[in-house]
Image (cartoon, rainbow, N blue to C red):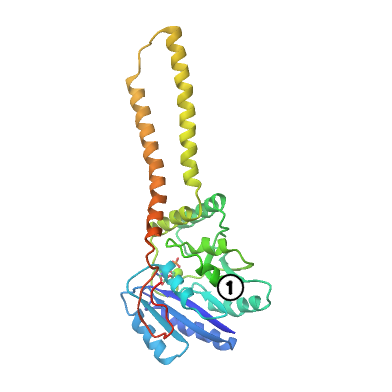
Amino acid sequence: MLLSLIVPCYNEQEALPLFYREVTGVLAQMRCDYELLLINDGSSDRTLSIMKELAASDPHVFYYSFSRNFGKESAMYAGFCNARGDYIAVMDADLQDPPSLLPEMVKILESGEYDSVATRRVDRTGEPPVRSWFARAFYRLINRISDADIVDGARDFRLMTADMKDAILSMTEYNRFSKGIFGWVGFKTYWLPFENVERVAGTTKWSFWKLFKYAVDGIINFSNAPLHIASWFGILMTAVSFLFLIIIIVRRLIWGDPVAGWASTICVIIFIGGLQLFCLGIIGQYLAKTYMETKNRPHYIIADTNAPHARKIR
Ligand code: UDP
Ligand code: MG
């Protein structure tokens, strides 16, 4: 059995050596064959040279270095494209995904009952409260309006069979939202809860704004609900205005023309104008996604690697 570990790294010079030491310690105890796929996502620090040092001294290590920063989603995709294992796992480089869980995860898959073992944080200690609140609201919302089953606190850290990996690779969309993709492909998933661990070294690569945009992307990628809301708004508005029209005509016929209100007219015009722009914006979001998809650009470009079998562009 070959185990592939995919590790996206973006400016992880402090954390990567610590991660390597811990994960190889766990793997040595597991006594299974493994490959470590270190994806350098356009880091500007010493991450790549650390990867090269590790690869020089350890034949299990393959590094894949992107030509620029493509984002964690692209890094994971590159990992999936290049993983040759029977079991494949994605792990963060900052030890927030404890390698000590791996033996248990492998055991669950080996029992043959499940196709994937996913991990879930049971708490959010060490995270700003505002961020936790938005995260919870996001999970409630996306589960209500999309058919991707996304668990609150789910991490990208999961172990899966090669079959599930192939299913994930068959989803070639450019705008990727892995939490949704994992849920969408289905398969039997075992959820393994664990307590939140804080990052060992370095700083988080996600600002609040970046996370917020990621959440909006997730909703747009997995749900058409905003489009439906826009059309319902339109229908409601038409119905209401039709009702008003009738009332005004009847009033005119019975009582003649009373003094018209200029201020209220302007308010209504501005309100409707705003609503129209809002709905146009929603349509624009989907159109922009469609535009990017039709361009069919590669998800990643590998500029440097030590793997002879590497898929360099895809
Ligand atoms: N990461 C990446 N590309 C990016 C941002 C992050 O490959 O553009 C990697 C990062 O190196 C880490 C993982 O994704 O291994 C998770 O990032 P981070 O720990 O900063 O996120 P958090 O745990 O704070 O959500
Ligand atoms: Mg982290």
Counting other residues with Cα less than 10 Å from the Cα at mark 1, is it few (<14), some (14-19), or many (20 or more)? some
| Residue 136, x across and y down, in percent | 52, 55
Residue pictured at 32% horizontal, 20% vertical: 262
Quarter of the rendering occupied by the N terminus: bottom right
State whether residue 161 appears in this view: no
| Residue 77, x across and y down, in percent | 45, 70
Query: Along the line of sight, which residue is nearer the eye, 270 or 135?
Result: 270
Query: Along the line of sight, which residue is nearer the eye, 155 or 70?
Result: 70
Residue pictured at 54% horizontal, 49% vertical: 145
Say whether residue 71 is left or right of residue 177. left
Vertical comparison of 306 with 74: above or below: below
Q: What residue sits right under mark 1 in the picture?
A: 163
Mark 1 residue element: helix
- Which quarter of the frame holds ligand 1? bottom left
Quarter of the rendering occupied by the C terminus: bottom left
Three-letter amino acid code at disc 1?
Answer: Asp
Q: Which residue occupies the extreme top position in the image?
A: 255
State whether residue 54 appears in this view: yes
| Residue 50, x across and y down, in percent | 37, 84
